[in-house]
Image (cartoon, rainbow, N blue to C red):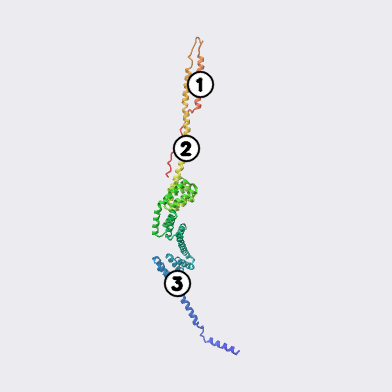
C-alpha cells in the first residue's frame, strides 16, 4: 500500500513539472517519417511533371518525323511514370510506325491497363491496327512458304489476306495481284486489288505503281467485260445480274452494265437495288441522272423517300432539278398516252365515218338508177290512142301503166333511202397533237 502511494505521488510531481497547456514533444522518429512521406509525394509529383514534359516532347518529335527521338522520350516518360498511359501509348505508336509489331502490342496493352474510360477509344483503334498488321505479317510469312512449295492458289489467297489485314502494306497487295494475274490467270481479281491500293493506300508511289498495273491489264479487262456483257444480254433474272456484276468487276466504268442493272431493278420494283446501282455509279464518278428520266423509272421516282435520298446522293439543287424534270416529262408522257388513246378512238371513228361516207355515196347512184328505171318505164308506155268516139282508146291502160311506173319509182326511192344514208356523215374532229417527251 505504501508502495502504491509512492508511485501516485511521483506521477503527480511529474505532471506538475510540465508548463500549463503543454504536451510532450513528438518522438523524433515520427517526425522523420512524415517528412519522408512528403518528400516521396513531392518526388512522385516531380516525376509526373517530368513525364508529362517528355510526352509533349515525344509528340512534337513524332510530328517532326523523328521516330527514334520520340521513342527515346516516350520510353523515358514510361520509366519515370509507369502508370502514365500516354507514355505507353506513344511507345506503342512509334513501335507500330517502325513495324516492331510485337513491341507495339506490349506497349498498347500496358496503356490500356492504365487508361481511363474516356481515353480507351483511341487506344483500341491503335490496338486493332497493331492486331491487323500482325495478322498481315503472319499471312505474308505463310504466303511465302506456300509459294516456295508451289502452292500458287494458297499463296495468292494468303497474299490477299495479308493486304486486306489493315490495307497498310501495299507490297502485299502487289504480291497478291502478281499471283492472281500471272499464276492463276485471274486478271479481274488482280485489278480489284490494284483499285484497292489506289483507293486505300497513303503511299503515292504505291498508287502510281498500281495505276500502271491497271493500264497494263486494261486490254484484257475490256475484252472480259465485253464478253460478259454480251452474255448478260442473252440471260435473264439472277443469271443476268451475276454476269453484270462480273462485267463491272472487270471494268467499273462500263456504263451499259449499270444501266441494265438499274433497268432490272426498276422492272422488279426493287428500290433498294436501284439505290445500290446509283451509289456504285456515284462512287466511281459515273453517275448519269438522265437514266432516271426514262419511263421505266417513273413509278420509283414517285416513292416518298426518293426525294430525300436523292438529296443525299447528289445534293438538294441537283435533286430538285431532276425531280422537276421528271415531273414535267411524266406530265408530257401522260398527255401523250391520252393523245394516243384519243388518236386510236379517232381512227375508229374515222373508219366508221369512211364506211358511212361510202354508203352515202351509194345513195345518189341508187336514186339515179331509180330515176333511170322510171324514165325507162315511162318510155315503155304505149302511145296514146283516142279511138273513134272513145272506142279503142288506151287512155286507161296508159294511166294504169303510168301509175305503176310511179309506184315503182317511189318504191325504188324508198328502198334507196332505207338502204343508204341520205345525208353525208360528219367527219370526227382530229385530236390535238402533243409534243413527245424529250428523253
User: Disc 3 and disc 1: Cα gap in Å?
Assistant: 138 Å
- Please report whichever mark, 2 or 1, sits nearer to the chain's N-terminal start: 2
Vertical side of 378 occupied by 190: above or below: below
Q: Nearer the viewer, residue 160 or 18?
A: 160
* Residue 4 at x, y percent in the picture: 59, 88
In which quadrant is the N terminus drawn?
bottom right
Q: Are marks 3 and 1 in contact (CB under 8 Å)?
A: no
* Residue 352 at x, y percent in the picture: 48, 33
**Which residue sits furthest bottom?**
2
Please indicate, yes or no, whether residue 314 appears anywhere in the rendered image: no
Instruction: Quickly name the residue at label 1.
Output: 408
- Please report whichever mark, 3 or 1, sits nearer to the chain's N-terminal start: 3
Give the numbered dot on residue 177: none
**Which residue sits furthest front?**
149
Element under disc 1:
helix
2 or 1: mark nearer the eye: 2
Q: Nearer the viewer, residue 59 or 305?
A: 59
Q: Residues within 10 Å of mark 2 (few under 14, many from 20)?
A: few
**Which residue sits furthest top?**
388
Instruction: Quickly name the residue at label 2.
Output: 344
Q: Residues within 10 Å of mark 1 (few under 14, many from 20)?
A: some
Splitting the image into 4 quarters, where does residue 203 fall? bottom left
Instruction: Quickly name the residue at label 3.
Output: 79
Q: Residue at x 45, y 75 (%)?
A: 43
Element under disc 2:
helix
* Residue 312 at x, y percent in the picture: 45, 53
Please indicate, yes or no, whether residue 175 appears anywhere in the rendered image: yes
Amino acid at each position: 500500500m505504501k508502495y502504491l502511494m509512492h508511485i501516485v505521488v511521483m506521477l503527480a510531481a511529474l505532471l506538475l513539472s510540465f508548463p500549463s497547456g503543454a504536451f510532450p514533444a513528438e518522438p523524433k522518429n515520427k517526425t522523420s517519417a512524415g517528412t519522408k512521406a512528403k518528400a516521396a509525394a513531392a518526388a512522385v509529383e516531380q516525376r509526373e511533371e517530368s513525364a508529362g514534359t517528355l510526352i509533349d516532347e515525344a509528340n512534337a518529335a513524332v510530328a517532326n518525323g523523328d521516330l527514334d527521338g520520340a521513342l527515346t522520350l516516350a520510353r523515358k516518360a514510361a520509366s519515370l511514370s509507369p502508370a502514365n498511359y500516354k507514355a505507353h501509348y506513344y511507345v506503342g505508336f512509334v513501335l507500330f510506325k517502325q513495324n516492331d509489331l510485337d513491341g507495339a502490342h506490349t506497349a498498347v496493352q500496358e496503356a490500356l491497363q492504365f487508361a481511363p474510360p474516356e481515353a480507351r477509344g483511341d487506344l483500341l483503334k491503335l490496338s486493332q491496327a497493331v492486331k491487323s498488321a500482325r495478322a498481315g505479317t503472319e499471312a505474308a510469312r505463310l504466303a511465302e512458304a506456300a509459294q516456295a512449295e508451289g502452292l500458287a492458289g494458297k499463296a495468292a489467297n494468303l497474299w490477299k489476306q495479308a493486304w486486306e489485314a489493315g490495307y497498310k502494306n501495299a507490297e502485299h497487295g502487289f504480291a497478291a495481284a502478281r499471283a492472281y494475274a500471272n499464276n492463276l490467270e485471274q486478271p479481274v481479281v488482280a485489278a480489284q486489288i490494284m483499285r484497292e491500293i489506289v483507293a486505300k493506300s497513303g503511299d503515292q508511289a504505291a498508287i502510281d505503281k498500281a495505276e500502271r498495273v491497271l493500264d497494263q491489264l486494261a486490254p484484257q479487262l475490256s475484252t472480259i467485260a465485253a464478253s460478259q456483257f454480251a452474255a448478260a444480254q442473252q440471260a435473264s433474272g439472277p443469271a443476268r445480274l451475276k454476269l453484270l456484276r462480273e462485267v463491272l468487276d472487270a471494268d467499273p466504268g462500263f456504263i451499259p452494265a449499270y444501266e441494265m442493272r438499274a433497268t432490272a431493278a426498276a422492272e422488279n420494283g426493287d428500290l433498294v437495288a436501284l439505290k445500290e446501282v446509283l451509289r456504285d455509279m456515284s462512287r466511281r464518278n459515273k453517275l448519269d441522272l438522265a437514266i432516271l428520266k426514262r419511263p421505266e423509272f417513273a413509278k420509283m421516282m414517285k416513292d416518298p423517300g426518293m426525294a430525300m435520298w436523292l438529296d443525299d446522293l447528289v445534293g438538294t439543287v441537283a435533286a430538285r432539278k431532276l425531280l422537276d424534270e421528271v415531273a414535267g416529262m411524266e406530265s408530257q408522257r401522260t398527255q401523250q398516252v391520252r393523245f394516243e388513246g384519243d388518236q386510236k378512238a379517232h381512227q375508229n371513228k374515222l373508219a366508221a365515218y369512211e364506211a358511212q361516207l361510202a354508203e352515202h355515196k351509194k345513195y345518189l347512184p341508187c336514186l339515179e338508177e331509180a330515176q333511170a328505171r322510171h324514165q325507162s318505164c315511162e318510155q315503155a308506155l304505149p302511145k296514146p290512142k283516142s279511138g273513134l268516139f272513145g272506142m279503142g282508146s288506151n287512155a286507161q291502160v296508159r294511166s294504169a301503166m303510168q301509175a305503176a311506173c310511179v309506184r315503182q319509182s317511189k318504191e325504188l326511192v324508198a328502198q334507196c333511202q332505207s338502204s343508204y344514208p341520205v345525208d353525208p356523215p360528219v367527219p370526227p374532229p382530229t385530236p390535238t397533237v402533243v409534243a413527245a417527251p424529250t428523253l
